[in-house]
């Protein structure tokens, strides 16, 4: 297993394996020979699943003999697994006239932005970052091991002030057995315009050798503001490739054009230390250069991230602690069991509905989960509550893809086709709906990852992986299994349970009444915010106070006791307790709460928990009790700050615009408008109902909102695809054809919604308080989304097509003709 682990940690091996699987994937779709397609698909299925199982094993931590804990391959987030907490202090900057300038709130906010970009550049870490007091920042990172903490400390404290300076041509002169640089350092010599810096050199193993002085120009030739890009060098493993902007390129040319090749040198200074002083081999230098000699693990990527995100103020790590899961161990365990029970019921439901074909669907869902967990483990992505939201959405989309195929398969069998021909026709006809619904979600996921931050990126990562896994399992895996079944004679006939049967409801005839209902619900949802105002948002949005109890090494207080005590209080906002551990100072109990509740929380905890209520024999000077365990209170910023909200809203708006453009290109603008309005309708009403019921919006609702938007567009696209198909091949009025299409997909709509609703309902009933808030919002969104895909999106399509005076059938046909012409063009 160690050899396999080493293989998976080798980027080249992973890349080559991925390329081999990609070649097989293209070969699978390129060949028309059924037997060959089946065999290639089988190799792909076994190869992908085998690689993902190895990558994810062991999935969670294992306790070995001797108390040693072997870390699981899947990284849990702070909310699920806990991690490490760093308390940082923002250092004041020197004033031009001497002394130091006080730290401003803007400088603290800039430091928070830089930390987020440095630690979560790839969207794999999901740190929790919040301001404390006037000049402190708390950073919580999931799953940080002790040996990693020192590297993380360096990453956090690195200012990343980069300077390029000319090395004095006289640097190597020797006067009285000492170099000129050494004499300047010792104060024996003064060279006008130059000063001595310490040059620390590392050997091939990365160990630091005794430093030596180097004489550099006092004037900086280039600085960090001249850098356009900094990335790990693709040609050299121990180097960072730097690309200068136009101004920096001009400065580099001016610096080097008069230098002597092979003799003169340039020094690269980072945070006041000379890290490299290479000889200039050709002149003039231009836009690009490298910083080499970075041999410590992770040093290249960390420096690249730091150079692209320099700090205005230095940071110092005041304290390092281990922290407990923000959701609590009991809540996590309840959530896992609730999720497993919900998925089991879903599996049983699929088996009862699709019988023998349901077994094939379940295998596809298992493969989907294996690929999802395997890829997340392989590339070190963090699995958190927003990740669970993304997983719920992708499992629902995977179920939906199977349902689309099976509903088509049922129609083809009822039409009199043989099983083999019916299977081929079902996959062919279902492909466009599966592709369009998944691709629109993929557009959103990519934009959220590109523009979002924190938990938004975590959701986007899980959703992207899940979409790819869903397409792989639905289109390839189940098709291969059906091929083996028919070729071996195991599958001779299929039957399906169809309790709904053929329906002929006039859905669009209810459009006016549903429009009134939807407008009323939207207005009621918006009014809920007007009524509840600030009370609609939890401390994740508003910030508040961090109450701290320093328990020490010998005192232990179960978080469950703290949560029980808090539940007896009537609080302005929900409070969040957490434990933090430090080997030197022991356990720190923290409660993040509304400032108005801080005093009552302290009083209640001292009253109900004996260890916190113990007092010393003597009173304080003011006559109040002197408690053995002291408490402190500090202002804390929102976890969801203004920048987070701005980035998230921009990402969502651009994502919606992307969906709008794609649907317009694939269908017609009327459809794009219907889908756009349906998403807004579902998100506004879902949030509004939660607020109306007395809930508080918090960080855990972000993933729920994104999940609702994903389900909404997925459900709507499937109905749109059938409407488009029927308009192209059926005769009759647009109204009757649209009604017919909605009726034809009704069974699929209800089945997909019901299977996901079952899972989420179990999670809301038995998943604990935090997961209940999360799943209740998704549950509301599923119901509203199912309603809107039938009674909101489609009526808007019909209304807009009539309003502009055109014919929807002609518009769809024109779009289809343009697409075919574009595909046929050389």
Image: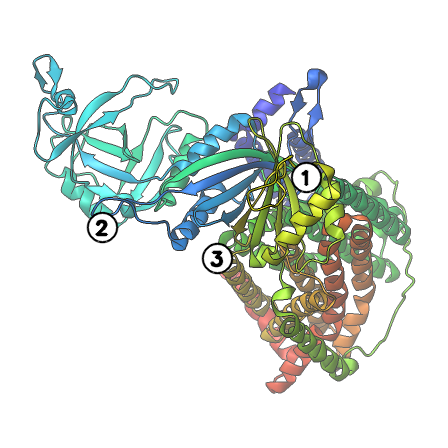
Mark 3 or mark 1, which has the lower sequence index? 1
| Residue identified by numbered label 2 | 247
Between tags 3 and 2, which lies in front?
Answer: 3
**Residue 408 visible in rendering:** no
| Residue identified by numbered label 1 | 612
- Mark 3–mark 1 Cα distance, whole angstroms, equals 38 Å
For residue 798, side relative to residue 767 (left or right): left
- Mark 3–mark 2 Cα distance, whole angstroms, equals 29 Å
Q: Position of residue 264 (x, y in %)?
A: 14, 29
| Residue at screen point 63% across, 74% down | 530
Q: Residues within 10 Å of mark 2 (few under 14, many from 20)?
A: some
State the SS at label 2. helix
Is 476 rendered above or below residue 298? below
State the SS at label 1. helix
Q: Nearer the viewer, residue 190 or 810?
A: 190
| Residue at screen point 57% across, 24% down | 7
Is 500 rendered above or below residue 463? below
For residue 659, side relative to residue 65 (left or right): left
| Residue identified by numbered label 3 | 643
Is 784 rendered above or below residue 309? below
Q: Nearer the viewer, residue 157 or 680?
A: 157
| Residue at screen point 17% across, 43% down | 253
Q: Position of residue 568 (x, y in %)?
A: 76, 53
Mark 3 or mark 2, which has the lower sequence index? 2
């Amino acid at each position: 297993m160690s050899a396999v682990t080493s293989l998976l940690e080798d980027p080249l091996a992973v890349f080559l394996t991925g390329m081999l699987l990609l070649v097989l994937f293209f070969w699978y779709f390129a060949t028309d020979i059924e037997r060959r397609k089946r065999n290639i698909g089988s190799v792909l299925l076994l190869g992908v699943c085998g690689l993902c199982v190895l990558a994810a094993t062991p999935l969670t931590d294992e306790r070995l003999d001797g108390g040693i804990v072997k870390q699981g391959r899947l990284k849990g987030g702070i909310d699920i697994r806990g991690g490490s907490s760093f308390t940082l202090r923002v250092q004041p900057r020197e004033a031009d006239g001497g002394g130091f300038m006080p730290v401003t709130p803007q400088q603290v906010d800039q430091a928070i932005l830089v930390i987020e970009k440095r630690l979560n550049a790839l969207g794999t870490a999901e740190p929790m970052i919040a301001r404390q007091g006037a000049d402190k920042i708390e950073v919580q990172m999931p799953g940080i091991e002790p040996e990693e903490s020192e590297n993380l400390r360096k990453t956090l404290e690195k200012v990343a002030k980069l300077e390029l300076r000319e090395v004095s041509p006289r640097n190597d002169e020797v006067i009285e057995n000492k170099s000129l640089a050494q004499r300047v350092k010792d104060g024996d010599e003064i060279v006008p315009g130059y000063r001595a810096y310490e040059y620390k050199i590392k050997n091939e193993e990365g160990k630091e050798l005794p430093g030596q002085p180097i004489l550099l120009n006092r004037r900086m030739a280039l600085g960090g503001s001249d850098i356009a890009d900094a990335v790990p060098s693709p040609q050299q493993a121990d180097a960072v490739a730097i690309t200068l902007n136009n101004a920096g390129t001009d400065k580099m040319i001016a610096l080097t054009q008069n230098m002597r090749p092979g003799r003169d040198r340039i020094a690269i200074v980072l945070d006041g230390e000379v890290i490299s002083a290479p000889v200039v081999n050709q002149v003039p230098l231009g836009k690009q250069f490298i910083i080499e000699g970075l041999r410590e693990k992770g040093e290249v990527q960390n420096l690249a991230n730091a150079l692209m995100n320099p700090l205005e103020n230095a940071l110092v790590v005041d304290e390092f602690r281990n922290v407990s899961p923000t959701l609590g161990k009991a809540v996590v365990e309840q959530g896992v069991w609730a999720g497993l029970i919900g998925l089991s019921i879903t599996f049983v439901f699929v088996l009862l509905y699709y019988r023998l074909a349901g077994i094939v669907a379940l295998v596809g869902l298992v493969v989907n989960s294996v690929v999802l967990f395997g890829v997340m483990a392989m590339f070190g992505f963090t699995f958190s509550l927003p990740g669970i939201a993304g997983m719920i959405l992708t499992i629902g989309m995977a179920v939906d893809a199977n349902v689309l195929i099976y509903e088509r398969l049922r129609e083809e069998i009822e039409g009199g086709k043989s099983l083999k021909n019916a299977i081929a026709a079902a996959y062919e006809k279902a492909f466009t709906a599966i592709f369009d619904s998944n691709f629109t979600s993929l557009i959103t996921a990519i934009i959220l990852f590109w523009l979002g931050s924190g938990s938004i990126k975590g959701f986007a990562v899980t959703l992207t992986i899940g979409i790819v896994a869903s397409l792989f399992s639905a289109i390839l895996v189940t098709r291969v299994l059906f091929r083996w079944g028919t070729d071996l004679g195991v599958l001779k006939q299929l039957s399906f349970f169809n309790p709904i049967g053929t329906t002929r409801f006039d859905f669009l005839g209810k459009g006016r009444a549903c429009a009134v209902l939807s407008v009323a619900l939207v207005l009621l949802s918006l009014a809920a915010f007007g009524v509840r105002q600030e009370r609609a948002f939890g401390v994740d949005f508003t910030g508040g106070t961090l109450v701290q109890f320093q328990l020490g090494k010998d005192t232990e207080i179960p978080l469950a006791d703290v949560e029980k005590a808090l539940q007896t209080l009537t609080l302005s906002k929900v409070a969040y307790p957490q434990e933090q551990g430090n080997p030197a100072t022991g356990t720190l109990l923290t409660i993040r709460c509304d400032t108005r509740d801080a005093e009552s929380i302290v009083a209640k905890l001292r009253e109900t928990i004996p260890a916190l209520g113990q007092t010393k024999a003597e009173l304080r000077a003011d006559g109040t009790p002197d408690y053995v365990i002291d408490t402190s209170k500090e202002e804390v910023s929102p976890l969801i700050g203004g920048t987070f909200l701005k980035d998230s809203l921009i990402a969502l708006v651009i994502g919606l615009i992307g969906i709008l453009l794609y649907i317009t290109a694939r269908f017609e603008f009327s459809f794009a408008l219907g889908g756009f309005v349906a998403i807004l309708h579902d998100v506004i009403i879902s949030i509004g109902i939660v607020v109306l019921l007395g809930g508080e919006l918090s960080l855990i609702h972000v993933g729920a909102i994104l999940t609702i938007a994903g389900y909404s567009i997925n459900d709507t696209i499937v109905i749109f695809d059938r409407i488009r198909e029927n308009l192209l091949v059926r005769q009759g009025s647009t109204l009757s054809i649209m009604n017919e299409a909605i009726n034809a997909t009704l069974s699929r709509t209800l089945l997909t919604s019901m299977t996901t609703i079952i899972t989420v309902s179990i999670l809301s009933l038995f998943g604990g308080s935090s997961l209940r808030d999360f799943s209740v919002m998704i549950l509301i969104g599923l119901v509203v989304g199912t309603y809107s895909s039938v009674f909101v999106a489609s009526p808007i399509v019909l209304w807009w097509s009539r309003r502009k005076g055109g014919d929807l059938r002609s518009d769809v046909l024109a779009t289809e003709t343009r697409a075919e012409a574009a595909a046929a063009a050389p």
